[in-house]
């Protein structure tokens, strides 16, 4: 039986990969990450259909469908017949789940909406303001520092961006990712 004292670390041989292999691995990971982002940000029509069907029957959609639609399907949900009603029901169901992951997905969806002038955007914004305690601390820091849920939307971030030339918030923007 071998013991720890019999172990010889010199038997461990590690070789550095070639630069070509590192580049190939980087390209592979980049492609995989891009595909993942596209899938997460544009949910399958199957998930949207599930959410619409469940909400139309006053049922609760699956957690997975809620997450996907919250992150990337809000505009598609709004584009449906009775879209405003569906979105209102969707937000109500999301609140019932009370999941930090769903709130984060809703925040991503809200930031992607683009049109922050309507009552629907205001409904989502107010929901997120009330749910900030469920979001990860890093995201709460971003929300507060950049005013992501302030009204009017984007004013603080736009002001900060104008001052980046002067260097006053450049380090902060880089740290937030």
Image (cartoon, helix red, strand yellow):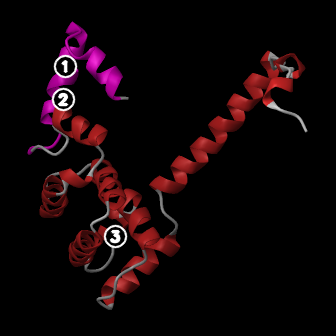
Identify the mark nearer the N-term, 1 or 3: 3
Q: Give me the C-alpha separation between circle 1 and circle 3.
A: 34 Å
Local packing at callout 1 (Cα closer than 10 Å; few below 14, some 14-19, many 20+) is: few
Are the residues at dot 2 and dot 1 in contact (C-beta closer than 8 Å)? yes
Q: Give me the C-alpha separation between circle 2 and circle 1.
A: 6 Å
In the image, which residues are magenta?
151-176
On the image, the x and y values in percent for residue 44 come to 52, 67
On the image, the x and y values in percent for residue 166 come to 20, 8
Dividing the picture into quadrants, the one containing residue 79 is bottom left
Identify the mark nearer the N-term, 3 or 2: 3
Is residue 3 rendered to the left or right of residue 129? right
Is residue 110 rendered to the left or right of residue 69? left
Which of 97/23 is in front? Answer: 97
> In the image, is residue 91 above or below residue 155?
below
Residue receiving disc 2 = 158
Q: Which mark is residue 129?
A: none
Residue at image point 12% right, 63% down: 119
Label 3 SS = helix
Residue at image point 39% right, 85% down: 53
Quarter of the picture holding the C terminus: top left
> In the image, is residue 115 above or below residue 17?
below
Dividing the picture into quadrants, the one containing residue 71 is bottom left
Residue receiving disc 3 = 77
On the image, the x and y values in percent for residue 45 come to 50, 71
Residue at image point 45% right, 53% down: 41
The verdict on residue 150 being magenta is: no
Residue receiving disc 1 = 162
Label 2 SS = helix
Residue at image point 32% right, 63% down: 99
Label 1 SS = helix
């Amino acid at each position: 039986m071998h013991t720890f004292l019999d172990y010889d670390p010199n038997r461990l041989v590690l070789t550095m990969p070639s630069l070509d292999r590192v580049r190939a691995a980087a390209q592979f990971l980049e492609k995989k990450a891009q595909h993942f982002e596209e899938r997460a940000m544009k949910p399958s029509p199957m998930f949207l259909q599930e959410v619409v069907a469940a909400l139309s029957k006053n049922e609760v959609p699956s957690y997975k469908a809620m997450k996907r639609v919250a992150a990337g399907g809000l505009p598609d949900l709004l584009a449906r017949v009775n879209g405003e009603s569906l979105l209102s029901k969707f937000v109500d169901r999301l609140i019932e789940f009370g999941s930090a992951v769903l709130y984060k997905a809703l925040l991503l969806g809200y930031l992607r909406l683009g049109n922050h002038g309507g009552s629907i955007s205001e409904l989502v914004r107010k929901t997120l303001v009330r749910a900030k305690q469920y979001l990860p601390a890093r995201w709460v820091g971003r929300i507060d520092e950049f005013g992501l849920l302030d009204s009017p939307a984007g004013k603080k971030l736009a002001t900060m961006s104008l001052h980046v030339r002067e260097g006053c918030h450049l380090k902060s923007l880089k740290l937030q990712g």
